[in-house]
Amino acid sequence: MSKIPVSDSFYQAVEELSKDLYVKALKDLPPDVRVVLKDTYEKEETETGRQVLATMLDNIDIADSRNRLICQDTGIPIYFVKVGNQLSVDFVRLEEAVVKGCQRATVEHPLRSSVVSPFKRQNNQNSSGYRIPSINYDVVQDNDKVEILMVPKGSGSENMSFLKMLIPAEGVRGVKRFILETIAQNVGANPCPPYVVGIGIGGTADMCMKLAKIAAVTRPIGARNPDPEMAAFEEEMYNAINDLGIGPMGLGGLKTALAVNVEHAYTHITQNPVAINIQCWPARRAKATISFDGKFEVGY
């Protein structure tokens, strides 16, 4: 089967959208996040928790009315790019377009550049550097479009990332223990709860961490894992984490986790990796779907 060649306007659209999606993600909170935050506020029983959640909702309203960023942390720019297998795409040009769009968003908006080199802490002032923005590729079967999901990942949540290489003898109980002990003892109030807890299970160490990131930042709140066993595990961990009572901003309350999402993979017979990645309460993301001719649709 011959593939559909993409036009020059396609790469131009990728660049423009990579720029616009970065800004949109920082300013326009997805509808599912807005709904769950409002519902969380309405159901909160503690006065302190209600005050904190009311402030979060006010923050969203101000960002909307004044066209401001929801949070000052512009994060590490992460792009998830899904390419339909029916398209003939030059991945070098595709990546160049994404990087340039990210840089233009920072310079033209302008945005705070939060990206630095690891030792010298050099800041290029354009939210990019060696291997950043982080671009994750996937190929989608029976598809003739490219989807770009942009996620600005703040440091407060990204710093709360953990991995443990469990052994099979520890079983599911060991997985649960690691998750709950990590949330209670290490995560706590640090990433601005109520947050989304992403859990990766299985694979290799690096794959497990990536699965946790995908679980934390790409899935709409309320969407369950299609695997019934994993969906049940999500529900159990959601209830258990909220029972910890950490609450909004760690000041106590009913809701610590807005959602608990799990992504998994088969793994080696002698190991069972488990990873945790957190997304803070403004679970920011923006998405666009692009056709071969550069036409596009924008969403979340």
Image: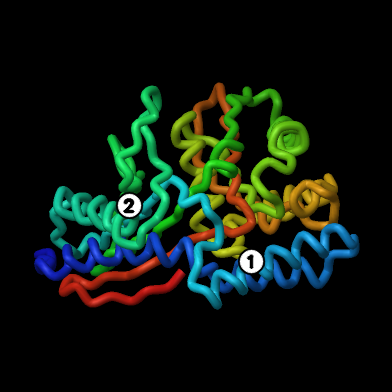
Q: Quadrant of the N terminus?
A: bottom left
Q: Secondary structure at mark 1?
A: helix
Picture coordinates of residue 211, whole percent (x, y): 50, 43
Q: Residue at image x 45%, y 32%?
A: 206
Nearest to the observer: residue 79 or residue 172: 79
Q: Is residue 254 left or right of residue 161?
A: right
Image depth: mark 1 or mark 2 in front: 1
The image's mark for residue 112 is none
Q: Is residue 232 left or right of residue 297?
A: right
Which residue lies under the disc numbered 1?
59
Q: Is residue 1 visible?
A: no
Picture coordinates of residue 251, whole percent (x, y): 82, 49
Q: Residue at image x 54%, y 36%?
A: 202
Picture coordinates of residue 296, whole percent (x, y): 28, 75
| Residue 246 higher or lower than 49, as above or below | above
Which residue lies under the disc numbered 2?
138
Picture coordinates of residue 142, whole percent (x, y): 28, 66
The amino acid pointed to by label 2 is Asp
Nearest to the observer: residue 1 or residue 137: 137
Q: Residues within 10 Å of mark 2 (few under 14, many from 20)?
A: few
Q: Residues within 10 Å of mark 1 (few under 14, many from 20)?
A: some
Q: Secondary structure at mark 2?
A: strand
| Residue 223 higher or lower than 239, as above or below | below
